Amino acid sequence: MIWSMNQTKGIGVGDNLWHSEKEKNLTFSIIFRPMNPFPIKKKYLINVITSNAIHKALLDYNKKKIWIKWPNDIILYSKKIGGILIENSIYLKKIYSSIIGIGLNVHQTEFKKEWNASSLKKFFNINFELDDIFYKIIYSIQKEYFLFTIYGENFVREYYINHLYLKDKTSLFYIHKINSFIQGTIRSITDQGFLIIEFNKKFYSFYQKEIKFLE
């Protein structure tokens, strides 16, 4: 694990940036080497395992208002409080190691409106210790990966799907390919991690760059 108390150039998916105030949040990376390499087409499982683990680690603070926003954000009361970025090392179409970057807003209270972000501190009257949350998340990731090795893909997929943000609720999306807005309903994810949305009584799957949440 590599933990920075002052992340100055945090990045997110695509061109997004991750903004974090010095010594107020958790910004760390994990060098992850699976016991058995993941096939490329199953790379989404590393994200699922990590997302599940962070979600479970935060359940002690609120069991009803924490969700996983597809594909890699942690949501609390409709605000983003955490994100995950994964870079994989691939050889012969298999993933032998990954760098899992995690950002979690803990004590920061100032956010620009366009970020739609918040923190644990803003919602809970608790004196959070960064060390405690850090070790809780690390333990939870280890445990979630252990559960995956025992019970398999469907086990971790089911938890992820059941805790998806906006699942089974009519929401607004922008579809890049057709340059248009649709109202659809998140139903599930595919066995490669694509988002399944129901629209006009039909099901469509999208990968990350094809669709944008507008809620």
Image (tube, rainbow, N blue to C red):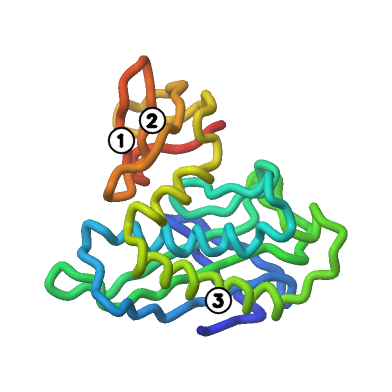
Judged left or right of residue 21, residue 198 is: left
Residue marked by disc 2: 197
Instruction: Indicate the amino acid at tag 1.
Output: Ser
Which callout, 1 or 2, points at the residue further toward the start of the chain?
A: 2
Query: How many numbered markers are drawn?
Result: 3
Circles 2 and 3: CB atoms closer than 8 Å: no
Judged left or right of residue 137, residue 16 is: left
SS assignment at label 1: strand
Up/down of 57 relative to 187, above or below: below
**Residue 79 position within the rendered picture, expressed as x and y whole percent measured from the top left:** 66, 46
Residue marked by disc 1: 205
Up/down of 150 relative to 63, above or below: below
Residue 138 is marked as 3
Q: Residue at x 26, y 58 (%)?
A: 42
Label 1 neighbourhood size at 10 Å, few (<14), some (14-19), many (20+)? some
- 161 or 86, which lies in front? 161
Instruction: Indicate the amino acid at tag 3.
Output: Ile
Up/down of 156 relative to 37, above or below: above
Circles 1 and 2: CB atoms closer than 8 Å: yes
Where residue 201 sits, quadrant-wise, is top left
Where residue 27 sits, quadrant-wise, is bottom right
Label 2 neighbourhood size at 10 Å, few (<14), some (14-19), many (20+)? many
Pick out the residue farthest to the bottom.
2
Location of the C terminus (image quadrant)? top right
SS assignment at label 3: helix
SS assignment at label 2: strand
Q: Residue at x 71, y 69 (%)?
A: 21
Circles 1 and 3: CB atoms closer than 8 Å: no
Q: Residue at x 17, y 75 (%)?
A: 91
**Residue 17 position within the rendered picture, expressed as x and y whole percent measured from the top left:** 53, 60
Judged left or right of residue 153, residue 183 is: right
Question: Disc 2 vs disc 3: which is toward the camera?
Answer: 3
